[in-house]
Every structure is written in structure tokens, then in C-alpha cells.
Amino acid sequence: MEPLKNIYNTLFLKKLAQAIKTEYIDFHEQEFIELAVQNDWEELALKERMRRITISLHKTIPLEYKEVLFCFYKAAPKFTGLGGIIFPDYVEVYGSGYWEESIAALEYFTQYSTSEFAVRPYLLLDQTRMLNQMQIWAKSENEHIRRLASEGCRPRLPWGMSVPSLKNNPLPILPILEMLKADESLYVRKSVANSLNDISKTHPDLMIEIAQKWHGDNPHANWIIKHASRTLLKKGDIRALQIFGYQNSEGIEITDFICRGTTLAIGESLYFSFQAASAYEKKVRIEYAIDYVKANGKRNRKVFHLSETVLRQGEKRRYEKTHAFKDLTTRKHYAGMHTLTIFVNGERKKELNFEVKK
């Protein structure tokens, strides 16, 4: 699979240079590319390449900040998707002294890419002012701008600059999320759910309170709450399970739990199956967990969703699953004894050990 960082390549830089030169005739294209692509280019990660491009642009466009923005306004529509975050990144690095112009630019650029990372320093600079702006964005007719309102203030935004005050106290962002809880856009609703899921990791009681308040409000809010509760559900939080109609696992029996082989090599897959039977009709949420061996020899549990269904009284249903142990950029596997566990409605029902070898 092509590394994500390779969206920033020589072809991209040439296209960007041409777009800038169209708006600023004195732009030195070759100097810009040489500043960006230095000897360490191949070793740079995605955001490191992005920042290198940003700095190289600044060094080769000898214009006032507002004039640079004018060029970028013209060029940005040609760079949609993740690659276009170079424009809001410029605002992040060089725009803090121009609040009004920078906020307007972030609003504009997010419509072609995303300004979620670039807005973080402005939260640190003046949280109250920035959150007020996000409430304005939450009313926008453009879904990308509304999403910026919720995504930009996430307490634990992946890849984003940390905003400790929002981690410690997420209450200030709740009015923004409240405004978007019935949003027609799935793109926006996913962002609201992710914000709430962030909250659930550090303030589970607050998340439960919000879930109980929102659940049943409307179908969109119901979807958001379900998606936002994924961490609590995987932890078997009784309060979260009850919101969605899951009681205890009494009456549910797991039998014929089979794992094909008790040893596998890294790169192979684990196959397992089992039968679930219910003594009476019951809504069930079935998950499996793997206790992975880490590099230091300790183990870390990862929970995976398998099924949500209603088992009728006396019904027996068989489940089969293949789980790959191939190394990924997001997970590296290590040799050692692992454990596979089956959970029903947050309660452990069965487990077995298997060994992973190099």
C-alpha cells in the first residue's frame, strides 16, 4: 500500500508551484521545490512534509500575510482532499497575529480540505473567542464548515495539537455539539460522535449523562449516541449497554468454542467459531477480545465488535470469524501467548489461549 505521506511528491509540488505562480508572477518555482525536497525528504512523515512545504512557501513568497492569503484563496480549490491542508497549515504557522483574516481563511480552506488541525493553536490563543466562532460555524449552510466546528474542538483530536483545558473540562464544547446533534450530514454527525467518544474516555459519567439526555430525541441523535458510545460499550459499561436495551447475559450460553489450531505464525490468520444459545428472547451484543503481546512482553487487550442481534427463546446461532495477524502500520505483532475472549452484553463468557510464533 502506498504510504499516505506520498500525496506530497514532486508532481504535487510542481502543480502547487504553478498554481501559486499563476497568482504571483515573481514566485520562484524551482527555489521552492529545492527548499522542500532536501536530502531527508524520503524520511519525512506526512505532517513533516506538509510543514516543510509551508515553510518553503513562506521563504519564497516575499509578500505580506494578507497578500499571501489572496494567492492561496485562488489556488486552494485546485487542491481538494488531504493534500490541501497545506493552506490552513500556513494560517496555523504564520497567521496568529491576524485573527480576523486567519479565521476567515480557515473557514474558506476547510471547504476544500480541512482546517481541523490549524484551528488548534487559536483555541490555545483565545479559547473563548474561538469557541464562540465555532458556534457561528455550527450554523453554516456548508457541511464542511459545520464539521470544522465540532472536529476542531475535539478534546483528543488524532494528529492534532493538544488542548489540555478541553481534555480536563469538555463542558465548553457541549453547546457546539448540541447545535449539531440532529445534523442532516453524516459527515458532521460522525464528527460529533467522535467528539463525544473522546469525552467518554476521560469523563464517562458526563458522556452517559449526554447519552441519556439525547437518546430518543431524533434518529440522527440516536445514531450519534450509539457511535459515540463505542468505547464504553466495548468496556462493558452497564449504563451504556442499558441505554441501548442490553441487559446482562443471563440465559445466554456459549458452546462449541473452537479455535483452529493453538499455534500460528505472524502473518497467518486465527480462525475461531462458537455457538450462542438463549434460554429466552434477548437482545445481545457479541464481541471478542484479543490480549496481544506487546514488545515489552506485557499484554494489551483489544476488543472487536462481532454482532448485534436478538436471539429468540431456544434459538441457537453459530458464529465464525477469521482474524488476521499480519503486521500493519497501526499494529505490529509479537510472539507469545495470546488470549481470545468472547463477551456477551459486556460480560465474559468464554476464553482460550493460543500461541503466536515468529
Image (cartoon, rainbow, N blue to C red):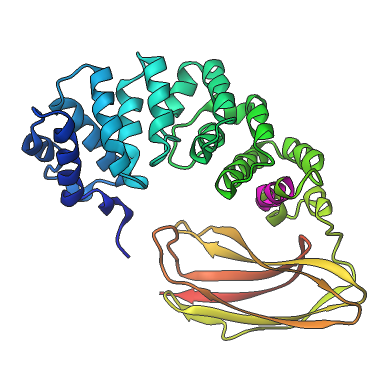
Name the spot of residue 285 as percent of width and height, x first. 75, 65
Q: Is residue 291 above or below residue 189?
A: below
Q: Is residue 72 left or right of residue 30?
A: right
Query: In this orientation, does residue 40 appear?
Result: no
The image quarter in which residue 214 lies: top right
Name the spot of residue 107 as percent of width and height, x first. 44, 29
Q: Is residue 34 left or right of residue 352?
A: left
Residue at 41% x, 64% y is 328
Residue at 93% x, 74% y is 280
Tell whether position 226 is magenta.
Answer: yes
Name the spot of residue 133 as percent of width and height, x first. 53, 22
Q: Is residue 15 left or right of residue 154?
A: left
Residue at 30% x, 29% y is 90
Query: In this orientation, does residue 229 appear?
Result: yes
Tell whether position 73 is magenta.
Answer: no
Per the picture, the main secondary structure of the magenta-coloured stretch is: helix
Q: Nearer the viewer, residue 215 or 304?
A: 215
Q: Which residues are magenta?
A: 221-230
